Image: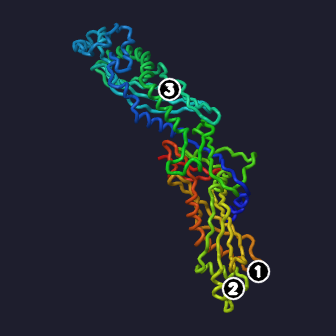
Amino acid sequence: MLLFWGSLLCWGLLPQAQGQARHLLFLRVSKDQLETDISDLFSEQRILDHVTRIPVTEAAGEGVPILDHLPFVREGLSRKSSRLDLSLVGDLLSGKSLPLLEELFQAGGLIIEDAKGPEVTLQILSDSLFQVTLQTKLYLSLQRILRFSIIKNIRIGVRLEQTGNKTRVALNDCHTPPGNLSIEVLEQMNPFLVNEALKVITGVLDKTLPFFLQKMVCPLATTLLNSLLEDVLRITLAPTISGPEDFQYHVTTTELTEEAILMQVQLVTRCGPGQRAPRPDHLAPQPLPKLAQGSMADLAFWLEAYNDILSCLYTSKELLVDLQDSTAAALIQLLSPRELEPGPETSAQSRGSVGLTVSTPDPPTVCLDGHTAMALQPGSLVLRGPSNTSSVSVSWKLLSKAMFSSKNQELELQFTPNSTVALGPHPAGLAGQEERLEALVLELLKRTFLPHHNELLREQGLPLPSIKGISFDQARMEPSEDYMLLTVPEE
């Protein structure tokens, strides 16, 4: 019953005339995947390495000595040797002299030992603006008195600017908001002294850390982020695919949605004469369904656009049937005019000159029956008489569940053996034998035609775009209302 209703839906989508070579697609990269890509890139490039193992009284490279901003540090003190008078530490640990805390700071006791992260979160602010937050965790020590950690955020604003058919990435700002220090004490020697030290440390770091992190982390972070986003917005063909004169993908517009970066893509394909007619303007694509749960990206084909692509990719090949095939012999006997029917009066020469061919000049068509994709292939079975002086033709439409595979960066359509056939016009002399004719045609198509046709369709796969960090190999096709979604699952 499913195949029957599917055939009614598909037959209305058969190609009409001259085709088009430009097709509208939609490419989405999930917000979660973009967060993961940014986080992985920052971790690989170790963007926090510049802030670790820094004595706060020294300028490490282009670092910012934090104690230079303390009101009680005299000019030049923070750039001297970090050797400490251990008697100062002993007095402080015993609680003998609290004023000596300032002298310990001046001597260079505060050190950034390590940095963890960053943990990346992405917040969509509008259809063209989003914010990337890098949460960093710094581990500091004040000699033997105190070890503590601080959590601080770095924020980067990103705007997507559209100029014609080009999308440009513009980084608005990279900064660390002041205040909101989250301090966790890890080790302490004297609780009373720790409280005094934290009062001083909190005030100092609240003023100095924003400037410090902005100078030490932002330049590299913004450079890497800009490069990654430019790669996401630049889609190309894999190196193994034929040249750009055959297939081209162009990102025409880009916008941010609640769940993804949405790119409108124009696919240019080769397309010969006799292809599908251009679509009327009023047949605008319907709204996209939500991105499938657990997917990092998808390529969305509006159904009509996908059938246009099939039409442009398709090149037919006539199949000559082996006359020794038992089903072919039965069809020849059923379709032959009286003068060609086997019998004592028919010569071997006459029988040998008969030919049976399967012709499929029109491309397959995919239609949606609910959330099931069906594939329809029209064609004809032609029996030719001696020297092509006469012929008998039976038209048919083969309907099958559509099977898709994406491998080697190509999307391939396949028919399944579990197919049904509907016959078109056939010779009037076959009245009363329609069921037998249909059964023989279906048997011949399933056993002889389908393997040949599936192989032909594999050779005419659609080259898929190449995007940094995303591979459409092993992607799965998920029909949804008016769209077919080629979904890339999370790894």
- For marks 1 and 3 on the same chain, the one whose residue lies earlier in the sequence: 3
What amino acid does circle 2 point to? Glu
**Front residue of 46 and 429:** 429
Dot in front, 1 or 2: 2
For the point 75% across and 76% down, the residue is 427
Residue 319 percent location from the top left of the image: 61, 70
Would you name the residue on which mark 2 appears? 341
Would you name the residue on which mark 1 appears? 429
The image shows residue 462, relative to residue 354, as above or below, that is above
- Label 2 Cα neighbours within 10 Å, binned few <14 / some 14-19 / many ≥20: some
Dot in front, 1 or 3: 1
Would you name the residue on which mark 3 appears? 155
Q: Quadrant of the N terminus?
A: bottom right
* Residue at the outermost front position: 387
Kindly indicate the quadrant of the structure image that contains residue 128.
Answer: top right
- For marks 2 and 3 on the same chain, the one whose residue lies earlier in the sequence: 3
Whether residue 166 appears in this view of the structure is yes
The image shows residue 48, relative to residue 423, as above or below, that is above
